[in-house]
Structure formats: structure tokens, C-alpha cells
Image (tube, grey):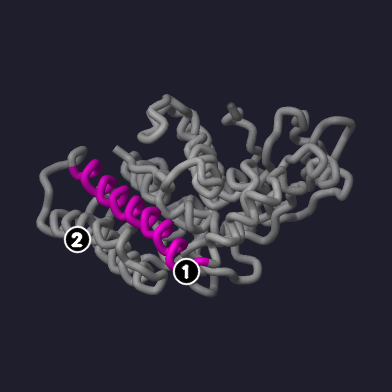
Amino acid sequence: MRRMLNTLFITAPNAYLALENENLIVRLDDEVKLRVPLLNLEAVVQFGYPGASPALMGQCAQRKIAMTFLTESGRPLAQLVSPSPGNVHLRRAQYRLADDAQRAAQVAGMIIAAKLLNSRTVLQRAQRDHGEQTGSLRDATQHLAQLARQAPRAGSGESLLGIEGEGARHYFQALPSLILEDQAFWGFSKRTRRPPLDPFNALLSLLYTLLAHEMQTALFAVGLDSAAGFLHRDRSGRQGLALDMMEELRPVFADRMALTLVNRKQLSSKDFRCTESGAVLLQDAARKAVLTAWQQRKQDMITHPYLQEKIPFGLIPYAQALLMARFIRKDLDAYPPFFWR
């Protein structure tokens, strides 16, 4: 089992990370503000990347502590990881699968089917919590169910991308109706990114970045190459398999949390700022609040639908990465995606 509170998030804009004996220290204006033993850490995530010492990065690499550097808005800059623990046979099998367009589309089809059904569950759960089902929500859930049946039979990555895109359109058209607080401020009409153009999209972008980090780390832990995907095809610098496998978890981890944070009034208009380019970003204090909620959510217990075991929520990416590795090694006949119930 992996500890859930072992990821250190650094959000202060002028923080510098360094090594002192066996500890990671955080300096602000030449004053040590935090000291964390390296043995308590599994990952470090730093926003803005003001700096980290080579000695610290070397120790983190030796101890297999992943260091991820993000922009202030949460866009990935770089990641430091130690050599892969995976064996060459597993990765060769992964590459052969990724190169087989038909088999890759079958795996990706199951992942997208799970994403569509999990998106449907988000709409259904939120609506049950807050009132009777409206016509727009009913239509969206019906479309998502129909598209989920089509996804495993898509036959090609191009067809699957069309199905996924249509599902996203129906889903994001319905999602704003689940925002109950200050819809004039929080309401959004479509998904925007790079940059996000409204507060809700800014919140989603941050949560998606956190999920991508979790998924990439999980794949690394089981020895898979997070860059060699089945739906997100090879592109320099893109973590294709991590992007593939986070699709089924986006509605569960990120979208549901965004709705919860907004509807519980844990964020408000004062927590965001707009740049000259039109990008909307979270203020530092708001980002810390989101990170705290994210870490707390990872400690909640859930019964895994395939393994039928109770595990912390934060272990779901690791469980799915392990199942993917077992499928690639042919220990399983098919990859079992995560279906939220």
C-alpha cells in the first residue's frame, strides 16, 4: 500500500527547494519555512518553479521521488523521475500493442466507454442530490449511454475520437445546470483550456493537471511507458498513455470535485484573477484550498468495482495502472476500466 499524504505541493511563488541532510527544505526569502524528511515523500509538485537544488534533485532521483514542475496555471513544464522499475518485456509488449491500430482502438474504446458512463453518473448523482431531472439532463444522459455502447465497437482511433468529442459536447452542455451557486459568475458554455477563459474552466484545468500527475506516477510505478498511448498517439513531450487512462477518471476525480467545491461555496470570485491575455487563474490561497481538498479526497475509501476490495480513493490510478500492466502481460483477457457506481 502507498501512503496517501506523501505528495508535497509547493505553491508559494518565490519558494526554493533544497537538501539539508536527509530533509527537503523550503526556503522563502532565505528563511527556512518547511522541513520534510525525504523518507516521508513519494512525490513533489511545484507550481511556478522558482528553483530546486541539484543536490535535492539527485537525492529525489535516487530515492524514486518524482518531482513535477508546473507553471503557475498548472500546465506541466517538466518531471524528474528515476530509471524505470519496469522490465523490457513489459514495455516491448506495450509498444507492440500501441503499434497495432485495431487492438489499440479496442483498448481505447473500453476506456472511452468508461469515461462516457462515468460522465453520465456525475450528471445523475448531482441531479439526484439537488432536484428533479430536467429535459436537458435527461437528454444528455441518454446520449452518453448510447455513445458508450458505440465506443468499444468504434474500430479506429479516428472514429473513437468522434464519439468521445460528441459525448464531451453533450456532457459539458449539461454540466453548467449542476452549478447551484452564483451561476452568473460560475456558468460556462464550453470547455476552454490553454488558457482557461472562465473560473470553472480554470478549476477544471488545475484538477486535470493533478490527475495527470497521479496517473503518470502510477504508470511509472508499475513499469509502463506513460508516453506510449493507444488513443493519444505519439507526440514528442506528450504522455499519451497517462492521458488515455486519466480519461475514465476525469469525471470521478475532477469534475465531481469541481462541482462540490463550487456548490459548497469553498471558492468564490475573489479566488480568481484575469490576466491581460484573458486567461483566468486561481489565486495562491485558492490553489492551496483545492490541493487540500484533493489530498483529503484521496483518503476516502471506495470498493473497487473490479477488484472488489476497499481501497483509498487515491489508489485508484495505481490500481488501474496495475490492471493495465496485467492485461498487457496477457494475465487478463481484457483491460477492466474503472466504472463509478
Q: Which of the two residues, 64 or 123, is positioned nearer the viewer here? A: 64
Q: Quadrant of residue 325?
A: top right
Give the magenta-colored segment's residue range. 100-127
Residue at the image point whose x is 34% and y is 72% from the top? 159
Q: Which of the two residues, 273 or 246, is positioned nearer the viewer here? A: 246
Instruction: Report if residue 105 lies within the magenta region.
Output: yes
Residue labelled with disc 1: 101
**Left or right side of 166 for 8:** right
Residue at the image point whose x is 77% and y is 44% from the top? 28
Q: What is the crowding at mark 1: few (fewer than 14 residues within 10 Å), some, or many (at least 20)?
A: some
Type of amino acid at the residue the image marks with label 1 = Ala
Q: Secondary structure at mark 1?
A: helix
> x and y percent of residue 335 in the render?
43, 47
Q: Quadrant of the N terminus?
A: top right
Q: Quadrant of residue 62?
A: top right
Q: Is residue 286 visible?
A: no
